Image (cartoon, rainbow, N blue to C red):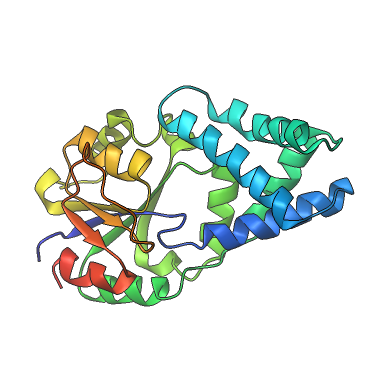
Amino acid sequence: MRYPYLLFDADNTLFDFDAAQRIAHQTVCARANLPFTEENYALYHRCNAALWRDYDRGLCTKEFLLVERFRRYLKASGETGDPERMCADHIDALGSSAILLPGALELCQRLHAAGHRLYLITNAVAAVQSRRFAASALVPYFEEVFISDTVGCGKPQKAYFDYIFQTIPGLRPDKCLVIGDSLSSDIQGANNAGLPCCWYNPKGAERPADLRIDYEARTLEEILPIAGQ
């Protein structure tokens, strides 16, 4: 077996975060009496994505990000609302969603049955991700979940991966594989920690020249032979 230990990102690698986020935003708009339109949703998505990129680069805290995305959304849309209330509603709604990507459950079942040890690595809000994971069908196949809020730091910081190595007995850099869709957190994190990585790239985005990508998978099923099956 090439990689006995598999460190899986959660959102948009195993969980359908795009679907969950859309549902959460619909809930936020309904509770705030704001219109939900495709244009406004795209605007929120841009505000949110820009702040998560800043977080990955260490330019802002997660606490700032969570409320600031709604401040920026309200300002850009011209709507009136309470950004802190909207943030709380968003977190509540998002935590109720445990939608998996097609094939994610089957992938984890097959890897677990083959003897791989699976771990979830995520920068998501602890209150959200703990609920989502607990409500998902993935629970029996994962040994532990490493959430940045509880670790005290997140991807792509080397300290986050150092914590994982201190926690998992017998873990060796050459025997584990980081698997994720995000270049700025998953792949950059693996680069920072000197770990092998697999970029899950279902949209066929262009490879960046400034990152080491050991493997690339366009489908979840392609991860099986990469992991050593």
| Image x and y of residue 224, in percent | 22, 71
Q: How many marks?
A: 0
Residue nearest the viewer, comparing 166 with 224: 224
Is 131 left or right of 72, judged from the image as shown? left
Task: Answer yes or no: is residue 167 visible.
Answer: no
Relative to 55, is 209 on the left or the right? left
Give residue 86's quadrant in the image: top right
Q: Judge by depth and name the residue closer to the eye, 159 or 224.
A: 224
**Quadrant in the rendering for residue 21:** bottom right
Q: Residue at x 25, y 76 (%)?
A: 113
> In which quadrant is the N terminus drawn?
bottom left
Percent position of residue 60, x then y = 52, 23
Residue 59 visible in this rendered orientation of the protein:
yes
Q: Which residue: 15% across, 59% down? A: 3
In the picture, the quarter occupied by the C terminus is bottom left
The vertical placement of 162 against 145, above or below, is: above
Measuring from the top left, give residue 7's x and y in whole percent.
29, 52
Along the line of sight, which residue is nearer the eye, 129 or 200?
A: 200
Q: Residue furthest right?
A: 33
- Residue placed most toward the observer, 199 or 176: 199
Which residue does the image show at 47% across and 30% down from the upper left? 55
* Position of residue 171 measured from the top left corner of the image (x, y, whole percent): 17, 47
Q: Residue at x 89, y 49 (%)?
A: 33
